[in-house]
């Protein structure tokens, strides 16, 4: 069954695959770049960022030589900024320790900062034709439905089981095409909702379809609790300048710039914010803007931006004063970018 499954799957892929830029190269750097961008990102959005990165940094040496701020600015809007920082750090590692030549073995690729099992397997199979099995959400979904597997995929035991299964089913003679086909079939045909079961080439083999459990596969043990946070941003202006603070390690948006922030345990009116502690005593409140909740993977952010005109910018620790017209030169979170979009639309 495995060989027939592979043959049918690859035939489907040849007839239905999307024409994506990174499928026209065997350059491991470009493939790694595309896989990093596509983590937690839709293909349509990721393609535009891929093009920008390839134009700005056509080789891994170009990426390694770039300032981190420039990389983060180019990444702005994609979210999960640790991906960009890890990408940049790994590029510098390759230049420093491999002479700029991308590693050629799974273990070496896996050791790069930010590279997990899936990305290492994808790069090695797509660039080098190595028999490394990929396991992503599409693969979990396809195998769990095809074989009606009732194991929670968000547990160590479930992940080990699917890793073993993927290695057993991998077509070692055509690893690149097989891996691409698995993910493409999951993305286009065996989708999370409304899979096209009636026209599926594997309908007669699909045990979940026979058992009526397609909607229950893959199974997850439980959801992560979402944490609510309340952010009160102070957009201070004086003589055409404003203040920015760069976020440090240990929280969301490391390395990105934002306005001075007061975080509270719950939503509070502007009048109760402790502005005096920041040296803000005389000001004119131009407007307050409440943003829609901003959803991250495990956090929901409730943000309000308060634009204040002051006679002179206060000496708030760890902030820098910049001309307002230079705001677009700094890498900022998407939440702050959306606020600035609202201002420019007025």
Image (cartoon, rainbow, N blue to C red):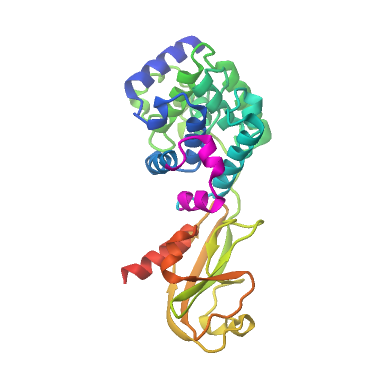
User: Is residue 216 in view?
Assistant: no
Q: On the picture, is 290 further left or further right than 167? A: left
Task: From the top left corner, tell me how far across and down residue 342 is, in percent.
Answer: 37, 67
**Residue 65 belongs to magenta span:** yes
Which secondary structure is most common in the magenta stretch?
helix
Q: In front: 202, or 127? A: 127
Q: 129 above or below 323?
A: above
**At x 48% / y 49%, what residue is drawn?**
75
In the picture provided, is 148 more to the left or to the right than 160? left
Q: Which residues are magenta?
A: 56-76
Residue 163 horizontal/vertical position (percent)? 61, 25
Q: Quadrant of residue 346?
A: bottom left
Can the viewer see residue 203 in this picture?
yes
Q: Residue 262 appears in which quarter of the rendering?
A: bottom right
Decide which of 51, 80 is in the foreground and name it: 51
Residue drawn at the location 34% of the way across and 25% of the way down: 198
Residue 147, image x, y percentages: 53, 22
The question of residue 133 being in magenta is answered with no
Q: Residue furthest bottom?
A: 282
Relative to the observer, which residue lies in front, 194 or 345? 345
Rendered view: 27 above or below 233: above
């Amino acid at each position: 069954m495995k060989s027939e499954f592979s043959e049918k799957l690859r035939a489907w892929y040849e007839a239905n695959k999307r024409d994506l830029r990174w499928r026209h190269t065997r350059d491991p750097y470009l493939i790694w770049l595309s896989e990093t961008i596509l983590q937690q990102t839709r293909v349509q959005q990721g393609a535009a960022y891929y093009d920008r990165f390839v134009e700005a940094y056509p080789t891994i040496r170009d990426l390694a030589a770039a300032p981190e701020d420039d990389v983060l600015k180019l990444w702005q809007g994609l979210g999960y900024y640790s991906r960009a920082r890890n990408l940049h750090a790994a590029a510098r590692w390759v230049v420093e320790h491999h002479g700029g030549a991308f590693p050629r073995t799974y273990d070496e690729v896996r050791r790069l900062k930010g590279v997990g099992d899936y990305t290492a397997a994808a790069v090695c199979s797509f660039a080098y034709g190595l028999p490394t099995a990929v396991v992503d959400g599409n693969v979990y979904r396809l195998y769990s439905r095809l074989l009606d597997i009732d194991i929670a995929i968000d547990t160590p035991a479930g992940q080990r089981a699917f890793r073993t299964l993927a290695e057993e089913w991998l077509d070692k003679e055509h690893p690149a095409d097989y891996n691409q086909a698995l993910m493409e079939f999951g993305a286009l045909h065996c989708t999370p909702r409304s899979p096209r079961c009636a026209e599926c080439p594997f309908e007669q083999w699909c045990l979940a379809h026979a058992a009526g459990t397609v909607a229950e596969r893959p199974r997850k043990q439980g959801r992560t609790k979402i944490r609510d946070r309340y952010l009160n941003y102070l957009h201070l202006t004086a003589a055409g300048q404003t203040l920015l603070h760069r976020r440090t390690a240990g929280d969301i948006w490391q390395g990105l710039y934002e306005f001075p922030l007061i975080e509270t345990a719950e939503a509070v009116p502007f009048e109760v914010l402790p502005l005096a502690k920041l040296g803000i005593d005389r000001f004119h409140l131009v407007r307050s803007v409440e943003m829609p909740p901003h959803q991250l993977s495990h956090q929901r952010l409730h943000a309000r931006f308060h634009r204040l005109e002051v006679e002179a910018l206060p000496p708030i620790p760890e902030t820098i004063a910049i001309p307002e017209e230079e705001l677009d030169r700094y890498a900022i979170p998407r939440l702050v970018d959306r606020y600035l979009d609202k201002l420019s639309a007025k």
